[in-house]
Image (tube, grey):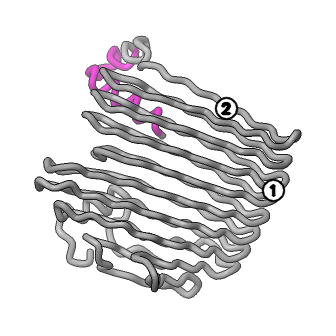
Amino acid sequence: MMNLDEIEKNLIKEVSGVTGVPDGAYNFRLNGKSIGRKSSDHINVDSLTDKNGLKITIQPGTKNEAVHIPVIIDASGHKETVHNEFIIGDGAEVTIVAGCGIYNCGVDNSMHNGVHVFRVGKNARVRYIEKHYGMGPGAGKILNPTTELYLEEGAEAELEMEQIKGVDSASRKTIAELAAGAKIKINERLFTHGRQTVDSKIQVALIGEDSTADIVSRAVVRDKSAQNTALEITGQSRCRGHSECDAILMDDAKVKATPILNAENLDAELIHEAAIGKIAGEQLTKLMTLGLTREQAEAQIINGFLK
């Protein structure tokens, strides 16, 4: 694949699931440079002229197509900020697979700041998959994603955002504004271990009538790591919003979950749920009676929780 070594291939596979050159449009980025790019008949992948990043345009009416834009870093000390803009035409349906993987074996921190802005046209649908992953015995692996979404009337967005493992520090921010009849579903999965830290903020504004939001954030926090999550929904019209924070706390870790509901209209229906707890002893016992070690049983429970 594009003259990548085994570590680089593994990073791409972890964050995007790609093991070869994908069908359709794509852009692969390694240590700040594009190493492969392709547009399709209905999707244009171009460089921004005023910022470091991409402008990806999906033509109106496009159906069942995908764009892959993984980023990988394996040069210790490499730091970058990348801006990507997505223009999704009216009535289009597209899947966008992003994500960043960092391998660091040196003494200097490596960092990727990714800013993704989505403008989703009327009645368009976008599925956005973003995974973050770090590996290597070196200094910090730092990933700071910012995602902004602006949904026009009847548009739909589904976000699957996951921090797999190995990320030492992350500051995550997701912002969405919805017009009438628009829908958004956000599934966030965060895993931290060691002394890793994550700060995640999700803010959704339900501006148009009959707009809806469903946000679920699940976290596993172990060793001496720490997570801080804030989910905020603002209802400015007749709308429905639901958010849910669930966390498994282990060892000497710390977790904070903050629900924020702002109702600015009499017909705004907003709900929040939250739960923080440890792995139940009976769950471990049941799995261990089936022949699993304690470590294997914990891993099985964690994997099921984060699905």
Question: Distance between the Cα atoms at labels 2 and 1?
Answer: 20 Å
Q: Is residue 230 above or below residue 172?
A: above
The numbered dot on residue 272 is 2
Residue 303, position in %: x, y? 40, 35
Nearest to the observer: residue 194 or residue 305 = 194
Dot 1, crowdedness within 10 Å: few (<14), some or many (≥20)?
Answer: many
Horizontally, is 269 left or right of 190 in the view? right
Nearest to the observer: residue 140 or residue 42 = 140
**Can you say which quadrant of the picture contains the N terminus?**
bottom left
Secondary structure at badge 1 equals: loop
Q: Amino acid at mark 1?
A: Gly
Q: In which quarter of the view is residue 291 placed?
A: top left
Q: Is residue 73 above or below residue 23?
A: above
Secondary structure at badge 2 equals: strand
Asked whether residue 290 is drawn in magenta, I would say yes
Q: Amino acid at mark 2?
A: His
Q: Residue at x 25, y 34 (%)?
A: 194
Asked whether residue 146 is drawn in magenta, I would say no
Q: Which residue is mark 1?
A: 208
